[in-house]
């Protein structure tokens, strides 16, 4: 009896354990079945972010204090950077104060330039202070031109960090080169490289040089067109040429002569928590050009031109170099630009691909999401993902795919647009077309998938011209649900908002 009783008790225990195990298995199974898979865009973005090689600096710190008078502090800062580099790298810590700089500050490998909160780098704004010429690209064409205010070439492991301010003071001289003679008030699309400005003769000379066919992929400095003393091409504020492992974090950039941040031919770039406050002609916020593995996050762009514009060279010169921009992530930024929000092009002749833009606020702009080129360019824009975008208003289009951008010089190199994914975009007001796809008969735009686009109020709902395989799921304009497939326009229509 005792044995039988023990057996029954053991059997009950086994059944209880088996029941608990079964419930546990079912619970895990249900959780597994209901667990949401990460969005493909999230997976792709994280893969890029994790692949970026980050900066690391030695513990060495060289401190710099502001001068007591108003003399040039350029030598003081440059000697600190050069000494830090020569000793194996580290941090140049710039304490609070005003530093007047009558020329270019050159970054070196393994050096972090850290600006304390009250530190102000105040550049002279005078054009000839940024000579001799250095190798650069100006709107996509290689050139020997004036140096940026802060410049590096072939540097490895460099950073500009801290809470300080970098003021290029372009209003003192160089910004005027992008305006009509005698004008003082900047007006987008009248000045800059679009109008009859002081620099236009030099712009046209560079355009002509860059449009010539050359077989050599790599040209020495001596073979490039030189734009030095007596010329008027405006330089960028910060340009990093052929640099690897770059960090720009926390600083504020003001009053640039031209583009504000220009990573050119770079790899492994992080731009984080930066404020751009610059409102002169062509003042794009950040222009990664022919660069790969780039992360732009948590930044505020208050700019006179596009907030972020991804580039890859222009026309024949851009095709000669043939270096794309790829693997770029833009997230959690605020675009308060006076021109366009996100822009790819129009200088994209080397190709742009694998671009991801997520969780961005866009204010009142001309065009919110703009992809532009013309038949001089060639190249491609493909595999672009955009998600979770909120837009206050546009004067032009919310989504704009443009293959007829102005400045056309008679070429026959249509650009390829394909594989775009646009999801969860909301715009309150649109002054032109909510959706504007302007393709070419010889190279139609294709494979553009839109899902959950809502435009509360738009002057015109859509325009599609020479496109293929474009879909619109859950797309609402003016309170009406659009069909999944939209008809092609029989004639070309223009959107005259740039």
Image: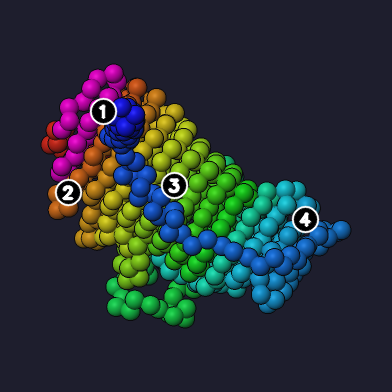
The residue at the point 22 percent across, 31 percent down is 473
Task: Give me the disc on residue 95.
Answer: 4
Q: Which residue is mark 1?
A: 475
Q: Please report contact status of discs 2 and 4: CB closer than 8 Å, yes or no.
A: no
The residue at the point 64 percent across, 63 percent down is 112
Q: Of label 2 and label 1, which has the lower sequence position? A: 2
| Residue 482, image x, y percentages | 21, 25
Residue 318 in view in this figure = no
For the magenta stretch, what is the residue range? 460-485
Is 495 contained in the magenta span? no
Q: Which residue is mark 3?
A: 330
Q: Which residue is mark 2?
A: 444
Asked if residue 457 is positioned above or below residue 133 in the image, the reply reads above
Q: Of label 2 and label 3, which has the lower sequence position? A: 3
Q: Please report contact status of discs 4 and 3: CB closer than 8 Å, yes or no.
A: no
- Disc 2 is placed on an element classified as loop
C-alpha gap between disc 4 and disc 3: 31 Å
Q: Is residue 332 left or right of residue 45?
A: right
Q: Is residue 411 left or right of residue 260?
A: left
């Amino acid at each position: 009896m005792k044995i039988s009783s023990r057996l029954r008790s053991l059997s009950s225990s086994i059944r209880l354990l088996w029941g608990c195990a079964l419930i546990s298995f079912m619970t895990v199974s249900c959780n597994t079945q209901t667990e949401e898979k990460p969005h493909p865009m999230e997976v792709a973005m994280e893969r890029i972010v994790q692949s970026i090689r980050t900066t690391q600096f030695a513990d060495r710190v060289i401190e710099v204090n502001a001068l007591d008078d108003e003399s040039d502090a350029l030598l003081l800062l440059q000697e600190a950077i050069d000494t830090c580099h020569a000793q194996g790298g580290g941090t140049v810590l710039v304490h609070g104060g005003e530093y007047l700089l009558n020329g270019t500050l050159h970054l070196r490998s393994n050096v972090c330039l850290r600006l304390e909160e009250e530190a102000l780098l105040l550049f002279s704004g005078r054009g000839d202070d940024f000579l001799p010429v250095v190798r650069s690209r100006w709107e996509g064409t290689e050139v020997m031109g004036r140096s940026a205010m802060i410049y590096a070439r072939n540097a490895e492991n460099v950073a500009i960090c801290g809470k300080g301010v970098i003021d290029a003071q372009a209003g003192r001289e160089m910004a005027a080169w992008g305006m009509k003679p005698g004008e003082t008030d900047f007006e987008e699309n009248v000045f800059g490289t679009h109008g009859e400005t002081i620099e236009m003769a030099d712009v046209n000379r560079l355009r002509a040089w860059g449009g010539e066919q050359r077989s050599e992929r790599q040209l020495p400095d001596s073979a490039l067109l030189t734009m030095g003393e007596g010329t008027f091409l405006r330089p960028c504020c910060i340009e990093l040429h052929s640099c690897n492992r770059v960090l720009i974090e926390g600083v504020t950039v003001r009053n640039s002569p031209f583009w504000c941040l220009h990573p050119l031919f770079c790899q492994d770039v992080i731009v984080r928590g930066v404020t751009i406050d610059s409102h002169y002609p062509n003042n794009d916020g950040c222009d990664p050009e022919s660069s790969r593995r780039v992360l732009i996050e948590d930044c505020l762009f208050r700019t006179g031109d596009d907030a972020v514009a991804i580039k890859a060279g222009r026309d024949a010169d851009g095709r000669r170099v043939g270096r794309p921009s790829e693997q770029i992530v833009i997230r959690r930024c605020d675009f308060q630009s006076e021109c366009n929000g996100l822009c790819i092009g129009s200088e994209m002749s080397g190709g742009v691909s694998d671009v991801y833009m997520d969780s961005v606020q866009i204010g009142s702009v001309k065009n919110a999401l703009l992809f532009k080129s013309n038949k001089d360019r060639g190249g491609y824009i493909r595999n672009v993902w955009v998600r979770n975008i909120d837009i206050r208003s546009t004067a032009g289009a919310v989504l704009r795919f443009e293959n007829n951008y102005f400045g056309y010089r008679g070429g026959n190199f249509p650009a390829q647009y394909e594989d775009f994914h646009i999801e969860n975009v909301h715009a309150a007001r649109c002054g032109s077309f909510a959706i504007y796809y302007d393709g070419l008969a010889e190279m139609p735009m294709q494979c553009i998938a839109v899902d959950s686009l809502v435009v509360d109020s738009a002057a015109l709902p859509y325009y599609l011209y020479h496109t293929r395989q474009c879909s619109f799921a859950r797309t609402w304009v003016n309170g009406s649900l659009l069909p999944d497939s939209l008809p092609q326009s029989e004639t070309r229509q223009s959107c005259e908002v740039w």
